[in-house]
Image (cartoon, coloured by chain):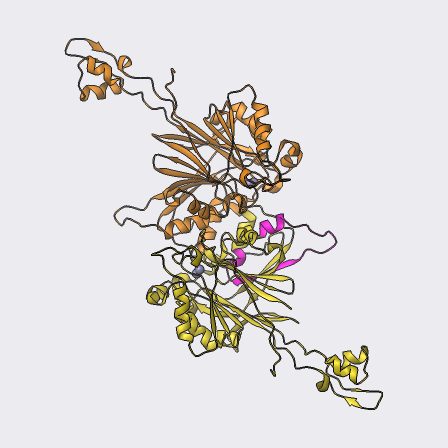
Chain colours: A yellow, B orange
């Protein structure tokens, strides 16, 4: 039930000894999901308390090198350090990202003669033309990867935009609904929202004991919402002994952008517990930021406000903003970025956090809906 | 005239916080030549006193990820941090490596929409079938990259093996002769030898002064080896006032291998001042090392002995061998690898050095040939 986010790289453009290139991990129920994988992510994993071998899903927001170039090496190193269970079928790592990702990974793994002890599948999101200037679009020839899979590759899917929601439906299972949405950047970029399903409320066992109902099949029927007739003849409805359901948590991670595109982000991120957004440059440099397809703290705050997010986490800082602990006189002050976002969010309930490499942010279970 | 080698990554298989993935820099005459470029090399540059922007040539020994995956990101970051001189034509970085390197780099740069402020050319070495087991050979389809160059790519060459020398002739200019030679590994791997040209001896100006010859055109003619007639009528030959020429230095860098292949390495590395060789595992694990296409210290020492190298530098250590400064009780002892190589080299004039990340090794000018 515990859920947290760990930032492995909070720098923009390239990895530096102060800030790694983009990568963050969402941990939940023993699985780790990786969002972006800049060069050096595997080394950042080793420096952290997280295990790269727990990764079951990878989400790549866009194909810029500072979000992508660490992926082939990470997969190779996970494989090298794996102790495969010969009885278990090797797990398949699902990788989601823009068209072209499949070809990049296949070419990198094939030319380096890399064999993996697990399989992987790349599911590609079809970008829209409006997501980038013309020069940021990849020609179809660049993204077609042919029919010959890498030996450890399983066929992936191509995920189209759902025109009704303006979102891409990536995952919809018992535990999670995961969607992607469109962003505008120098190249097509995406954001992701991960929403836990509602959890059924707990049975009020104290009340059941008072009524003389012992643990057994009746408990199960009540949990399923059925009514049951007690020995006394009394009909007990589920409502009487079931606490209200727990709303699922929602975590949203934006890729690089100078703005969201369309309404998908509002649909996907409404009421987010945590919204992670880039803030490459300070408000005073908005023109330069937008020119490079990036955001300032105020722009990030506007997105958080539009979604009613509870916590806005800023990351992807220009390497000129050193971590607070390393800052010297005359250096740019990264905490200024926090203040700029807070100014926009004044009066709202949204809290602002500055990410740093290796920061872990727990995401608390929601309270009952009625509380 | 100064020349040195700096190790940026001395670990095998993958980068770790203790040892970076393979990369070393040969500095000479204001230029930096990079040998191999594992993931994280750009960050290792930032941690060192070297400047990545000084790189004019790159040599990739083979296409395993721990020698290659840092290259696209390094080029992008050099470009991002460059202050181009609008008057000067941008320099062209020459990149040498096995067939397939051109396609890897082109696909990585194109799919990430990376534009560079300088141009580059990839010169590919044609491997021989015997350089690896069958499964390590790339199909021709994998290495063909088509006619469409990346916007900053200049047409590169394909370098064939010279059957007379069993070497590849890469560079032959006023200053240097650079050759590659064949190695056996799990995938085709190459070594490189860089040889400085002989330097003409200095003029003995003290003697010329005694003879009353003043600096001027006569000096130039003597330096060119001509005889001159002095005012006194005396004929002065160049031999009388020219010191013997200085032999050039020779630095050889082997790629991953379990053995050299053919005679090229002897031809290229004879009398090397410095020979850099991998020693992935200790002598006691030779079987495992060879199975994975790697060497032990004894095997590296045998290569140094065959070439009469003056200094053997070991690197590319399994990540289980921590740097001496980080070693704790019970850890494998990397200095044992040095002793194993020294045992083989007992009685020879070859010195053994263990590389560590950020070690810089100066390579002294040679003494006069007659000394
Ligand atoms: Zn970025
Ligand atoms: Zn970007
Ligand atoms: Zn290696
Ligand atoms: Zn190798």
B120 or B7: nearer the viewer: B7
Q: Position of residue A263 (x, y in %)?
A: 47, 76
Specify start and end residues of the magenta stretch as a single range: A75-103
Q: Is residue B259 visible?
A: no
B65 or A175: nearer the viewer: A175
Residue at the far left in the pictured view: B231
Instruction: Tell me the quadrant of the picture where the C terminus of chain B can be found.
Output: top left
User: Which picture quadrant has residue B239?
Assistant: top left
Task: Determine the quadrant in which ligand 4 lies.
Answer: top right
Q: Position of residue A174 (x, y in %)?
A: 66, 72
Instruction: Tell me the quadrant of the picture where the N terminus of chain B can be found.
Output: top left
Residue found 63% across the figure and 36% down from its top: B289
Residue at the far top in the pictured view: B233
Q: Position of residue B310 (x, y in %)?
A: 48, 24
Q: Is residue A244 magenta?
A: no
Q: Is residue A63 visible?
A: yes
On screen, A199 above or below A291?
A: below
On screen, A89 above or below A127?
A: above
A90 left or right, relative to B120: right
Q: Is residue A87 magenta?
A: yes
Tally the numbered discs: 0
B111 or B46: nearer the viewer: B46
């Amino acid at each position: 039930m515990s859920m947290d986010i760990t930032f492995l790289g909070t720098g923009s453009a390239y990895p530096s000894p102060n800030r790694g290139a983009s990568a963050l991990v969402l941990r939940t129920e023993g699985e780790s999901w990786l969002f972006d994988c800049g060069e050096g992510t595997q080394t950042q994993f080793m420096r952290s308390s997280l295990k790269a071998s727990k990764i079951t899903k990878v989400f790549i927001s866009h194909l810029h090198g500072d979000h992508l170039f660490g992926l082939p090496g990470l997969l190779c190193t996970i494989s090298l350090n794996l102790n495969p269970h010969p009885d278990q079928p090797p797990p398949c790592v699902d990788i989601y990202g823009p068209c072209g990702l499949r070809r990049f990974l296949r070419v990198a793994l094939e030319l380096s003669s890399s064999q993996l002890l697990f399989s992987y599948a790349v599911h590609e999101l079809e970008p829209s033309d409006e997501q980038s200037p013309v020069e940021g679009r990849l020609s179809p020839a660049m993204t077609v990867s042919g029919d010959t899979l890498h030996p450890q590759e399983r066929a992936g899917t191509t995920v189209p935009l759902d025109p009704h929601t303006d979102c891409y439906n990536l995952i919809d299972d018992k535990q999670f609904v995961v969607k992607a949405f469109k962003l505008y950047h120098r190249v097509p970029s995406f954001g992701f929202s991960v929403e836990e399903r509602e959890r059924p409320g707990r049975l009020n066992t104290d009340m059941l004991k008072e009524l003389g109902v012992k643990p057994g099949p009746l408990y199960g029927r009540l949990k399923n919402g059925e009514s049951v007739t007690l020995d006394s003849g009394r009909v007990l409805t589920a409502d009487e002994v079931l606490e209200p359901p727990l709303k699922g948590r929602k975590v949203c991670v934006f890729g690089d952008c100078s703005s969201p595109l369309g309404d998908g982000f509002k649909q996907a991120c409404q009421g987010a517990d945590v919204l992670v957004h880039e803030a490459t440059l300070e408000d005073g440099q908005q023109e330069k930021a937008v020119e490079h397809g990036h955001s300032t703290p105020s722009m990030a705050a506007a997105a958080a406000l539009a979604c009613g997010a509870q916590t806005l986490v800023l990351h992807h800082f220009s390497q000129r903003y050193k971590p607070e602990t390393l800052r010297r006189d005359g250096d740019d002050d990264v905490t200024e970025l926090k203040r700029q976002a807070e100014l926009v969010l004044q009066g709202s309930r949204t809290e602002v956090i500055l990410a740093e490499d290796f920061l872990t942010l727990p995401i608390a279970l929601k309270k009952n809906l009625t509380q």
